[in-house]
Image (cartoon, rainbow, N blue to C red):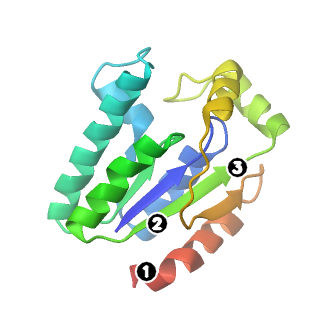
Amino acid sequence: MIIIVFGLPGSGKSFFASRLADKLNVKYISSDQTRKGVHALGKYSFEDKMTIYHLMAKNVDEDLNQGETVVIDATFHHDAMRAIFINLGKRRETPIRFILIQATDSITKKRLSGIRQDSEADYAVYLLIREQFEMPEIPILKLQSENDNIDRMTQKALEYLRGSYE
């Protein structure tokens, strides 16, 4: 199975996605970590972003060959980014699930004001991506990230995935 955790910078998606992967004991792939791994920090043109998404898809494809379930963490703010993985899932006949993580502007602004381990995104990037964000027209689970609800979010995600995962 492919589990896509997506949302705007500062929404809490990476925090959530890494914990969900731990809870499920599955592979975790992050666009931020992938970008760092190929020395592409500071490269954020649409083409640069698509290169990272294609690289993540290649890694997911290899993990699926090993029988792995994968949690992928990225903004996925354009339909073209999601299409790469939707097509991979169809080609592999592998279920794919989408979980959108959202947060209020005030929580996001506070989160983005601090130093973050892997992401270079700041509040200006958040505003830009928010403007560019294309809401998918596919089934998704929407979760609201607050500062103290990670356990509730994880439980809702597990319930959402349960029918597909077992």
- How many C-alpha atoms fall within 10 Å of the one at disc 2: few (<14), some, or many (≥20)? many
Residue 104 location in percent, x, y?
81, 43
Q: Earlier in the sequence, mark 1 or mark 3?
A: 3
Q: Quadrant of the N terminus?
A: bottom left
Residue 51 or residue 119, whichever sits in front: 51
Q: Earlier in the sequence, mark 2 or mark 3?
A: 2
Secondary structure, mark 1, is: helix
Task: Give the CA separation, mark 1 to mark 3.
Answer: 23 Å
The tag on residue 102 is 3
Is residue 159 visible in the rendered structure shown here?
yes
- How many C-alpha atoms fall within 10 Å of the one at disc 1: few (<14), some, or many (≥20)? few
* Residue indicated by mark 2: 97
| Above or below for 89 versus 122 | below
The tag on residue 12 is none
Residue 6 location in percent, x, y?
54, 49
> Residue at image x 65%, y 24%?
128
> Residue at image x 53%, y 63%?
138
Residue 112 location in percent, x, y?
69, 28
Amino acid on which disc 1 is placed = Ser
Q: Disc 1, disc 3: CB below 8 Å? A: no
| Above or below for 32 versus 104 | above
* Residue indicated by mark 1: 164
